[in-house]
Amino acid sequence: MKKWLLAIGALTLSFSLAACNSQDSSGSEKSKEEKNSKTHEKSASNTESEKYKFTNETGDFTILAGYTNEQSDKKEKYINIDFKGFKIKFLPVLVDVKLSDSAKAKDQFKGKDTLRAIMLTTEAENTTDHDVDYNGNITMITDTKEQLESQGGLVSDNPIVMTYKGKVKEQGSFLIPLKDQKSTPKELDLKFSPPYKVENGAVNPETGQMGNEQTIKVKYTPKESL
């Protein structure tokens, strides 16, 4: 989010420079520049609201807020966790989604046109010398008394859920719908299940677990602070 905001800041700077240059123009040119300046201001205002929106194959997203804690990166706001060399960084955000036609056809969204959800933007990286199997199982507890689960394993469409054959990095996101579609959780407990070491092409569920479950607590953060 910070990189995005810096890009918007650079755009605003170009508007400012254009306004400064207009001071050396003739009267008629000043009038023209003033008109352009107003157009730029309107454009900047539109940009302010649009920078919290994006579209992908699931639909049209509007970011309402984020969730951070003292572990959050100062610049990018991501939180990092490490399972014995398998590293995950993530940023939870509260979103409203206008679902696409293709998303409406999925079982998890059937009968819905819009959705309020927690989206976990994620990046996973295997820094170990062995293969790793990551199922993407995350349990989320909200302060509004909801217990929610990510779509992990074979049913997940998040690219980070896979077998990492070597030192591989992948990015993706989990979309976890809220049960109460009008709620705005202020606190989340996120419980991440550990990945497994792959040995001889297989996982041993008794001895291959890479560490223990990790619980990360986060609090509501205004979108402007992301």
Image: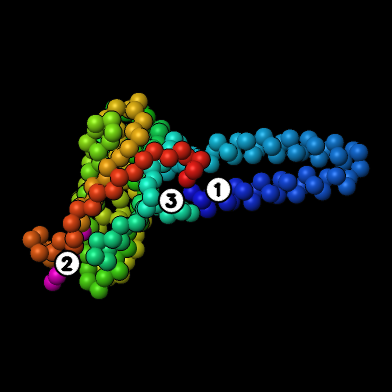
In the rendered structure, which disc, 2 or 3, sits on the residue that comes first in sequence? 3
Residue 21 picture location, percent across and down: 82, 48
| Type of amino acid under label 2 | Val
* Up-down relation of residue 206 to residue 70 (above or below): below
- Mark 1, secondary structure of its residue: helix
Residues rendered magenta in the picture = 195-201
* Up-down relation of residue 125 to residue 25 (above or below): below
| Horizontal relation, residue 130 to residue 58: left or right | left
* Up-down relation of residue 169 to residue 42 (above or below): below
Q: Nearer the viewer, mark 2 or mark 1?
A: 1
Give the residue pinned by disc 1. 5
Residue 119 picture location, percent across and down: 35, 42
In the rendered structure, which disc, 1 or 3, sits on the residue that comes first in sequence? 1
Residue 198's disc number: 2
Give the residue pinned by disc 3. 77
As measured in the structure, the alpha-carbon distance from the residue carrying label 2 to the one carrying label 3 is 31 Å
Residue 91 picture location, percent across and down: 38, 48
